Amino acid sequence: MRSSQTNASTGAAGRAFAPGDAGPEAAERKERIREEARSLGFGAVGFASASEAPYAERLRTWLAAGRHGTMRWMARDPARRSDPRAVLAGARTVISVTVPYYRGDWPENGEPGSPEATAQAPRGRIARYAWGRDYHKRIRRKMKLLARSIAALNPDARWLAYVDTGPLLDRAWAERSGVGWIGKNTNVIVQGRGSWTFLGEILTDLEIEPDQPARNHCGTCARCIAACPTGAIVGPYELDARRCISYLTIEHRGAIPLELRPAIGTRIFGCDDCQEVCPWNRFAVKTVDPDFAERPEQQTPELIPLLSLDEDGFRARYQGTAIARAKRAGFARNVAVALGNLGDRRSIGALAVALAQDPEPVVRGHAAWAIGRIGGQAARVALGEAAGREISREVLAEIHTALDSCSDAASTSLMEGDSRP
Ligand code: SF4
């Protein structure tokens, strides 16, 4: 996401530097930018020379293997992704920054699936980065302020600022600029602070002395690879996004592959498992930045009310949050999967309503899957009725698969002596 571009002076005091200045002046301007970044609340700050992007070749291989799934925007304009000078002509420096967002432990009701949570209404789990308001706007505002301090060093300096979705390989630049290394889970880990952090970059034509690239400290650890519920970390530093729960629940539109749905558990927006187990995250410090204050209803929300949100209801609840990115249909699809995985028969009524009335086939289809996974007589009735009125072929296929799984579950129950309806 491009934030802004300027060559206007802010009128701030200080000696002006020419873009190509080197030597003591370059070191001085670096310290001034670093101080300014810290005063604005950025965590780590690092500098790298703008040249061909690190890991550009690895990106090409990853894309060629189709591991980006349906995120076609990642494959767009590879020349710009590979070299920041194709993004900002004359760019000399990439400034990488981090913005920590760690907010402490999950709430008391927080481990969905735990006995305490199960006794209450069914709840889902939302990734930590989405616990508060949309971070893009907050970070973009800070980045603009930082960029203005660069403009104060030289009124002719040109810059572009990006948060998260720009054409730069943000993790690669964070590593090269010394901010943190890319761990085996493919997240950037800041030494002594962990990986609960957003990344941002400022490209500028100012010459600034580069920092040393970050050293990798994963060592022999492989916890993240073992912890990934869907096996998406197919090897050290190798993520297959098509299996990643964050991709499946946020970026992916359409049906979630049947074989991956059970492993999604109660995660309805993103997944943090590969970071939760990372030993470096023991050092995370809770941010007090009010911009990232959590909203309890955005951590482990009750699932059933979410299933019936229409477009207006979804917008009213999630506009201005990262969750809006999943769109209403994708989010309701995820909610249905979580309800199916919880297996709580109290949710069959709400799922049956979604199966009958939701305008989106993808939601109806996943509601059918969830009902089949919960099973029982009420599930068979709901699915049977839906089979008689559904016109979408893809939803009908889901209904018949769900009916089959109900039958399988019923025969297993009978064999085990379970006489529940
Ligand atoms: Fe590296 Fe271990 Fe963290 Fe994975 S869990 S990123 S291997 S330190």
Image (cartoon, rainbow, N blue to C red):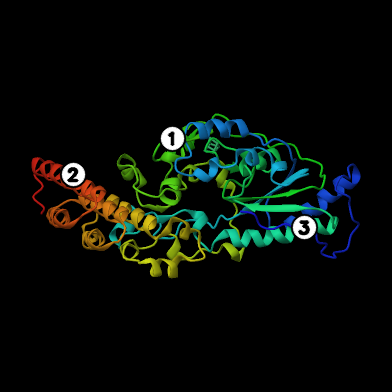
Left or right: residue 339 versus residue 214 is left
Disc 3 residue lies near ligand 1 with CB under 8 A? no
Residue under the point 26% across and 48% down: 394
Q: Label 3: which residue?
A: 36
Residues 195 and 327: in front is 327
Quadrant containing ligand 1: top right
Q: Is the residue under label 3 in contact with that under label 2 (CB below 8 Å)?
A: no
**For the residue labelled by badge 2, is the local secondary structure a helix, a strand or a loop?**
helix
Residue 194 in picture, x, y percent from top left: 59, 46
Location of mark 1 (residue): 226
What residue type is disc 2 on?
Ser
Disc 3 residue type (three-letter): Glu
Labels 2 and 1: the sequence-earlier one: 1
Residue visible at 63% across and 41% down in the picture: 81
Find residue 328 and report its horizontal and vertical position in percent: 39, 60
Quarter of the image where one finds residue 209: top right
Name the image quarter holding the C terminus.
bottom left
Give how far apart the Cα atoms at labels 2 and 1 are: 29 Å
Q: CA distance from mark 1 to mark 3?
A: 40 Å
Q: Is residue 364 left or right of residue 221?
A: left
Q: Which residue is at a point 49% across and 60% down the rendered structure image?
A: 131
Q: Which mark is residue 405?
A: 2
Residue 264 located left or right of residue 386 = right
Q: Nearer the viewer, residue 249 or 289?
A: 249
